[in-house]
Amino acid sequence: MIIKKFDIAIIGGGPAGSSAALLLSKRGYSVCLIEKKIFPREVLCGEFISKEVIEYLKENLLYEGFLKLGPNLITSFRFSSENGKDITSSFEFDAYGIKRSILDNFLLTKAIESGAEIVQPAEVNALSRKGDDYLINLKAGQGDGITLNSKFIIAAYGKQNILDKVLGRGFYRRKSNLNGVKFHIEKSHFNNFNPEEIQIYTGDGIYCGLNAVDDKTITLCYLEKRDRTQSSSRELLLRLSRQNKKFCTLLREDFFEYLDKAPIYGTGNIYFGKRDIADEGIFYIGDAAGVIAPLAGDGIGMAIQSARLISDILTKNNLVKEKSVYDYKREWNKMFLRRIYIAGLIQKSILNNILRNPGIKMVSYIPGVLPSLIKYTRG
Ligand SMILES: Cc1cc2nc3c(=O)[nH]c(=O)nc-3n(C[C@H](O)[C@H](O)[C@H](O)COP(=O)(O)OP(=O)(O)OC[C@H]3O[C@@H](n4cnc5c(N)ncnc54)[C@H](O)[C@@H]3O)c2cc1C
């Protein structure tokens, strides 16, 4: 058995893990990144990225490479409720649509190029202590017989994971009735889709976002309140098309026939409540630390911001544990608590049949409310 020692082991190679790996290895730390899936792979996401992600790409000289991936530029936002009311706003920042398979693969490749060592595919299924260090246990048969040992763990494994139970995180038993779903749909199944817009449609128990992610593809992503009588995750979308005329007008006749055969990326039971952020030498980043309501706030931006935060704190404190835990908890709360809270309120109001339409009316009548909400939920 070969033992490999690292300063920092990062679990999960999504946007949070890859950016932490890039930033920390650039600063000279020995970093190991463990990712369970072979890339490129798809994940549930609306695939809309904005300000914070673009800033990170620019700061780390990755923006030109990103543009070569062919992302779709998005300049404005349209919100259409079932009472026919539209709210629109132009973005005051750069925003794009891009498939997560492409973006995540790009970010992971850049992390490896910056010096992070990658163990992939390998799933971490337990952690144990060895003095001050952590021993990282991989699923049987993975990792070519190496044992990984590190001083710090950065947990970037996403919103729900077996490790939450293993690490005794209190929330892992909590149930929500919220379900997220994503489809990639060919443009030809829509009537006149404007690629420069991200469009949100609301209906009973569902809100749905659409944006182009390349020349040919539209990402359709929704969050729904699932009830026990529902037989499939397409059901509420069908109901939305009956309730929301503008959504219906957008869809070509063959849309639902196509959808029945299209691959579906989704997950149930998305927990949006509070989580622990750091514990001894384990620091949670990205969705593992806190999940922001989708379409009301950018989870990828938050994932990258939290990676930047932990990288700065570990560097500033020269990898001193206690001080880093204290600083990370304090700064994470300052940066993210308010935006998660506001995005949560927006989501609750949109999914509430009594609040939704009066709320939308109010936002449409008071100029400046929508740009402020966009600002407060997008860092
Ligand atoms: C319906 C919906 C729509 C959304 N739309 C948007 C959007 O349009 N824009 C936006 O910015 N955000 C959006 N988000 C949020 C965004 O998807 C997440 O915030 C983002 O993916 C978080 O990145 P992450 O790196 O923390 O986690 P993830 O992207 O989930 O990455 C975690 C990685 O860890 C790996 N992993 C997991 N467990 C292990 C393990 N035990 N061992 C090793 N590897 C492991 C996984 O394979 C994965 O690659 C949306 C979320 C939902 C639910």
Image (cartoon, rainbow, N blue to C red):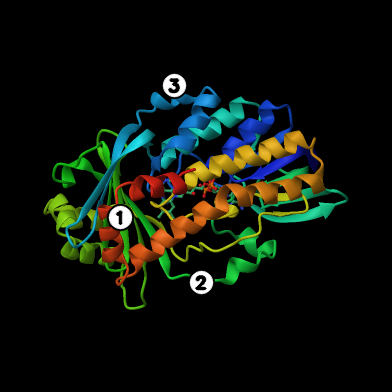
- Residue 286 appears in view: no
Q: What's the CA distance linking mark 1 and mark 2?
A: 31 Å
Q: Secondary structure at mark 1?
A: helix
Task: Residue type at mark 1: give it.
Answer: Val
Measuring from the top left, give residue 212's x and y in whole percent.
Answer: 28, 40
Callout 2–callout 3 Cβ contact below 8 Å: no
Q: Which residue is mark 1?
A: 363
Numbered disc 3: secondary structure: helix
> Foreground: 355 or 50?
355
Q: Is residue 347 left or right of residue 167?
A: left
Q: Dot 2 corresponds to which residue?
A: 175
Q: Nearer the viewer, residue 379 or 135?
A: 379
Say left or right for 209 vs 270: left
- State yes or no: Cβ of the residue under disc 2 lies below 8 Å from any atom of ligand 1: no
| Whether residue 85 is situated above or below residue 105 in the rendered picture | below
Q: How many marks?
A: 3
Q: Nearer the viewer, residue 123 or 338?
A: 338
In this rendering, position of residue 122 left or right of residue 225: right
Q: Earlier in the sequence, mark 1 or mark 2?
A: 2
Q: Are marks 1 and 2 in contact (CB under 8 Å)?
A: no
Q: Residue furthest bottom?
A: 229
- Kindly identify which numbered label has been placed on residue 64: 3
Residue 222, position as x, y percentages in the image: 34, 57
